[in-house]
Structures are given as C-alpha cells and as structure tokens.
C-alpha cells in the first residue's frame, strides 16, 4: 500500500522530522566524524586528534547526537581504565559515502569557491550592497 503524499517525509515542510536529521549531518563536526569513522572504529582521543579544532565538549556532544540518531555505536570494553570505541552503524555507513563526498567536493573545489568569494567581496565596494560595482 502506498503512503499518501501528505504523510510522506518532506524536508521542505516546516514540521517534517527529517529536518532534524539534516541539521545533524549538516553540522561540520558531525560530517567530519562520520567521514573519519568510515575507515573503522576509533577511540575518543583518536578522533579528537584527527579533527583539528574539535574541542572535547563538541566531540562529546557530536558523538552523543550521532549515537542517538542510530548512526554511531559506542562500545565500552572492560579494561582498566575502561576503553571506549566509536564505530559507524550499518545506517551510519549508508550515510558515510554521501557525507565524505561533500568533503571530497569541498577539497577539490576550494580554490574556485575562494576565487568566487574574492570576486564577490571586491564587487561589494563600500556600502553599495550585494552586486554593487566600485
């Protein structure tokens, strides 16, 4: 049986719960952590060292959110001290390729983006507003 159009997820609708998922994965830290974990499980401090500029608090919040959404699995090992490892779930793996594609696109196109930004900023000139010529 087909789902009526009015009940299907529609991220353009203000009340659609898919927006929460988009908010989570559009976060730069979440995207970088997901991309990093695509290579395999890692411990907390390994992730923090690999993602420069990521604070302990931001990483903790990011991992908790990703775990809550079913994208990351946290596994604690009975060692002294306790060892905790984070890994993508099967659902997280389905997202990792897409998210990492964004990173690859950004790395491949950063020069063009920065050139466009310089052109845009140069065209602003004084208080002329967007698109104003000097």
Image (tube, rainbow, N blue to C red):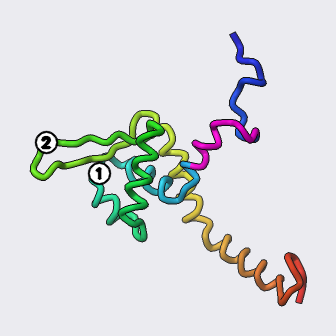
CA gap, disc 1 to disc 2? 16 Å
Q: Which residue is mark 2?
A: 78
Q: Quadrant of the C terminus?
A: bottom right
- For the view shown, which residue lies furthest in the top direction? 1
The verdict on residue 60 being magenta is no
Which corner quadrant of the image does residue 125 belong to?
A: bottom right
Q: Quadrant of the N terminus?
A: top right
Which corner quadrant of the image does residue 68 belong to?
A: top left
Q: How many residues crowd around disc 1 within 10 Å: few (fewer than 14), some, or many (20 or more)? A: some
Q: How many residues crowd around disc 2 within 10 Å: few (fewer than 14), some, or many (20 or more)? A: few
- Residue 132: % across, % down: 90, 81
Asked if residue 85 is positioned above or below residue 133 in the image, the reply reads above
Q: Nearer the viewer, residue 107 or 45?
A: 45
- Residue 122: % across, % down: 78, 85
**At numbered mark 1, what does the secondary structure look like: helix, strand or loop?**
strand
Report whether 82 appears left or right of 25.
left
Report whether 94 appears left or right of 42.
right
The residue depicted at 77 percent of the width and 23 percent of the height is: 5
The verdict on residue 20 being magenta is yes
Q: Nearer the viewer, residue 14 or 39?
A: 14
- Residue 8: % across, % down: 71, 26
Q: Which residue is mark 1?
A: 42
- For the view shown, which residue lies furthest in the left direction? 80
- Residue stretch rendered in magenta on the structure: 13-23
The residue depicted at 39 percent of the width and 61 percent of the height is: 57
Q: Nearer the viewer, residue 124 or 78?
A: 78
């Amino acid at each position: 049986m087909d789902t009526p159009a009015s009940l299907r997820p529609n991220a353009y609708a203000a009340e659609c719960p898919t927006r929460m998922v988009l908010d989570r994965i559009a976060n730069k830290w979440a995207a970088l952590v997901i991309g990093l974990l695509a290579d395999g499980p890692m411990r907390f401090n390994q992730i923090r060292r690999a993602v420069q500029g990521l604070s302990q608090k931001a990483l903790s919040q990011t991992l908790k959110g990703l775990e809550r959404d079913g994208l990351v699995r946290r596994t604690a090992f009975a060692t002294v001290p306790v060892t905790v490892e984070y890994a993508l779930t099967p659902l997280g793996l389905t997202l990792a390729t897409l998210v990492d594609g964004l990173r690859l696109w950004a790395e491949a196109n950063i020069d063009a983006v920065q050139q466009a930004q310089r052109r845009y900023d140069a065209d602003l000139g004084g208080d002329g507003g967007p698109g104003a010529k000097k």
